[in-house]
Image (cartoon, rainbow, N blue to C red):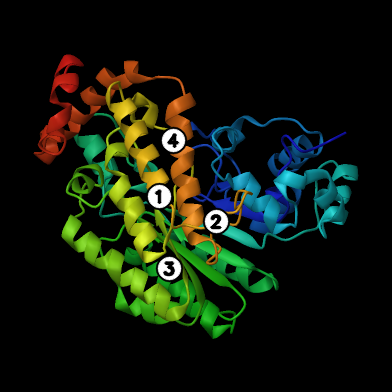
Amino acid sequence: MSLEKYFCSSPWFHMTILNDGSYSFCRWSTSPDKLPHKTDKIQNQHPIQWFQNSSEMAGVRKKFLNNESYSFCQDCTLMEKHKKVSGREKQLLKTGIASTNFEKTFLSSSWIKPFKQSYYSKGHTDQYPIDWQINLGNFCNSGCVFCHPSVSSKLASDFRTIGILNHDPIRSWTDDTESFDKFLDTISMIPNIRYLHFIGGEPLFMPTFKTILKNLIKQNRNKSITIGFTTNLTIYNQEIVDLLENFDVHIGLSIECLDELNDYVRYGSKINQVKENLNHFVELSKKNNWTCSIRTTPTFLTVRNLLPLYQYALDNKVHIESCNFLSSPEIFKPSVLPEPYKSHFIKEMSNWILSQSQVTRTEKRNINTRSNYLVEQTILQDAESYLNYFKKEKDESFLLPKSLEFLKKLEKIRNNKILDYLPEYEEIFRTAGY
């Protein structure tokens, strides 16, 4: 039986801790507002016990080994449909499995023994998680319109004010000393951890991020563990940068566009400061030979402003990638963009890609999207995935009235207006009830 269609190697080496301490099997799985309530948390179960023996992790491994689809993997399925490099393909590559030559590379993978062990032990494993995503909490100075209150304290405050949220977000697990110490102890006892990626909230605001870095340096783990983090580019924390210079680092730079629309979509940011910090982190990465990626989350509001960002990435040879095609909240999906704006985007993006004749490209897709040898090809590859998306994905412009209704509620307390940033959309927005 071929496992090519659904198999993912991620649950044999990766796990995620969400902002409230809940565990999740994958950093690319469905957004926080669609995840079911989880009883397994770092507050009441040890991370290694959960990873190796929990019914959730065992169940995911069994599904993959039986070539069964899993509902929380839909984002990766959508990415592969439009030839965007998916999280699944990236994780397969880490275990030596090529999605383009699956069967042969699966059988020759050095991980074949752990796969077999799980097959014969009902999904359990003796492996340790060596690739982590750690959500430190929801403390954030930005209230991005497409975000979720579980990962933004500023958005949570606004949601309470306009009556969308009638309770405080769950307390961040890193505020609990016992849970945080448990995490530090767990990291110290796993000898072969390769990668720790931190998100928030905004990690550069959070003292726990600094504490973890200091702890790893004290243990002399800074030469063996790669640190990743994603920042919203609103601040530059020199003390944390000084600590990071002891590590190999992957930086994710969150920005939607290079104009003032970014201030509206990523409310709380100021574009001049954001661009200054963007340039600063790009130069810092080049100086230290770090991996640097622009992490954009295109919505129907920002797709027409994407091209200058792609051009910036190309000019500076910086990776650019979104985690997925935004699927939640659905009212901000790129597919909400109505005609004729969608057709205009397709034409502009097609012409831009065709104009990049100076970029040398290989016939095969580059799955290693952080390879510094194929940066330019990967940028065009990512741009093409959005071109494919708009050509093939179903029109969901019927959601536009609901989108604008939500934005109007936020605008009442934020004292801004989307048409000040997108005046060319006035006719279609007014027609949809704005």
The amino acid sitting under disc 4 is Leu
Vertical side of 118 occupied by 192: above or below = below
Tag 4 residue:
387
Mark 4 crowdedness (10 Å alpha carbons): few <14, some 14-19, many ≥20: some
Which residue occupies 20% across, 51% down? Answer: 268
User: Whole-percent x and y of residue 394?
Assistant: 45, 20
Tag 2 residue:
369
User: Whole-percent x and y of residue 423?
Assistant: 12, 32
Vertical side of 419 occupied by 144: above or below = below
Between the residue at mark 3 and the residue at mark 1, the CA separation in whole angstroms equals 17 Å
Which residue occupies 65% across, 52% down? Answer: 91
The amino acid sitting under disc 3 is Phe
Whether residue 203 is visible, yes or no, is yes
Whether residue 45 is visible, yes or no, is no
Of tags 1 and 2, the one toward the viewer is 2
In which quadrant will I find the C terminus?
top left
Tag 3 residue:
209
**Quick one: label 4 or label 2, which is nearer the N terminus?**
2
Q: Find residue 146 and report its image quarter.
A: top left
Q: Nearer the viewer, residue 52 or 277?
A: 277
Q: Residue furthest right?
A: 120
Of tags 4 and 1, the one toward the viewer is 4
User: Whole-percent x and y of residue 389?
Assistant: 46, 31
Tag 1 residue:
171
**Quick one: label 3 or label 1, which is nearer the N terminus?**
1
